[in-house]
Amino acid sequence: MLTRQDILLINAALQFWAEEMEPEDTQMLKLYAGDPTADQIWSPETIQRLRRQLDSARLKYAVTNASGTELQTTELFSTPQAAEQAKTEATAQVGTLLLPDITEQA
């Protein structure tokens, strides 16, 4: 489950990648992604767009069944703790939803 602190770390890593690495080097991506088939080219603009989306995303938390295939409740929670308290089964999971900033959609 992702938290706001996790998003901050991901953003910092993306910024480091854009500034210190060669974002368009597919060999570097394969190495760091741990995926020998990764061949995506990331432009600095793409990285900055992703960083903005992550920065402005609203995080909500949902409770699912153990396999993560069904919601246990239709309510979305503002904190992981509130979602944990809403679990009705010990095997339930809490998942993170990244919702776009409403103002960016207008």
Image (cartoon, helix red, strand yellow):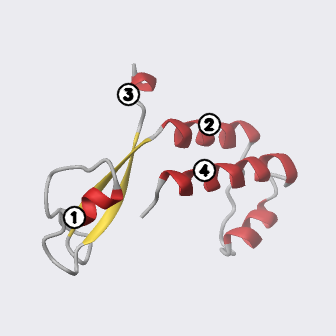
> Which marked residue is nearer to the observer: mark 1 or mark 2?
1
Find residue 26 and report its image quarter: bottom right
- As drawn, 64 above or below 57: below
Q: Identify which residue is drawn at 42% across, 32% down.
A: 101
- Crowdedness of circle 1 by 10 Å Cα count: few (<14), some, many (20+)? few
Of 96 and 26, nearer the camera is 96
Q: Identify which residue is drawn at 80% across, 66% down.
A: 27
List x then y, in percent, for residue 105: 41, 25
Q: Identify which residue is drawn at 26% across, 65% down.
A: 84
Instruction: Return the residue at label 4.
Output: 8
List x then y, in percent, for residue 66: 23, 77
Instruction: Return the residue at label 1.
Output: 85
Determine which of the numbered discs, if any, sits on residue 102 in the image: 3
Going by the numbered disc 3, the residue's amino acid type is Ile
Going by the numbered disc 4, the residue's amino acid type is Leu
List x then y, in percent, for residue 68: 26, 70
Q: Earlier in the sequence, mark 3 or mark 1?
A: 1
> Which marked residue is nearer to the observer: mark 2 or mark 3?
3
Determine which of the numbered discs, if any, sits on residue 49 in the image: 2
> Which marked residue is nearer to the observer: mark 1 or mark 4?
1
- Mark 2 residue element: helix
- Crowdedness of circle 3 by 10 Å Cα count: few (<14), some, many (20+)? few
Mark 2 and mark 3 residues within 8 Å of each other at the beta carbon? no
